[in-house]
Amino acid sequence: MNQILNVFNGSSIFSKIDLGGAYNLLRIKEGIEHLTDFRTKYGSYEYLVMPFGLTNAPTSFQNLINDIFQDLLDVFIVVHLDEVMVFSKSEEEHVTHVSTVLTKLRANNLFAKASKCLFHVTSVEYLGYVVSSEGLKMDQAEVQLILNWPPPRNLKDLQ
């Protein structure tokens, strides 16, 4: 975790690109679709794309994203599953970086969910931290949740 967050050092402008629904863009290897089959009263079905819930889905998706962005990882992006964080030291540099990322996404038929993206901001929440030019801070909303957690009243609460 710290390795991921340390790459932001010295950056002052950020964009967060969410690849909503991206799992559904991963085609299941031809010939093994039957491993995902299920039956309803209307008939039998099998997935052609990666459904949520398969144990290897996150790993498969992360491998795809790492392959696509291999030359950019830790240079000016970090990726955690379906969230791409672009970081730069200047506005001019950031425009180029975001354009490069969006071009790679388009070339690989991956799409961002605009309603969940943030572009050209000076501070952004990422993996439970607030990242800015001042460094990393714990997200206060997350800290407040822990502080407001009620203490256990009995053994069952403690479990």
Image: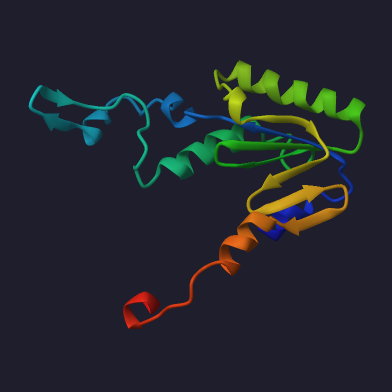
Q: Quadrant of residue 27?
A: top left
Q: Quadrant of residue 124?
A: top right
Q: Position of residue 68 (x, y in %)?
A: 62, 30
Chosen colour scheme: rainbow
Foreground pick, 153 / 15? 153
Give the side of residue 42 with respect to residue 4, left or right. left
Which residue sits at x=57%, y=21%? 111
Q: Position of residue 12 (x, y in %)?
A: 87, 41
The image quadrant where one finds the N terminus is bottom right
Which residue sits at x=43%, y=78%? 152
Instruction: Note whether 51 is above or below 48 in the view shown.
Output: below
Give the side of residue 139 with respect to residue 36, left or right. right
Foreground pick, 77 / 130? 130
Which residue sits at x=83%, y=39%? 122
The image quadrant where one finds the C terminus is bottom left
Instruction: Note whether 3 is above or below 98 in the view shown.
Output: below
Q: Position of residue 7 (x, y in %)?
A: 78, 50
Q: Position of residue 93 (x, y in %)?
A: 89, 29
Which residue sits at x=79%, y=40%? 75
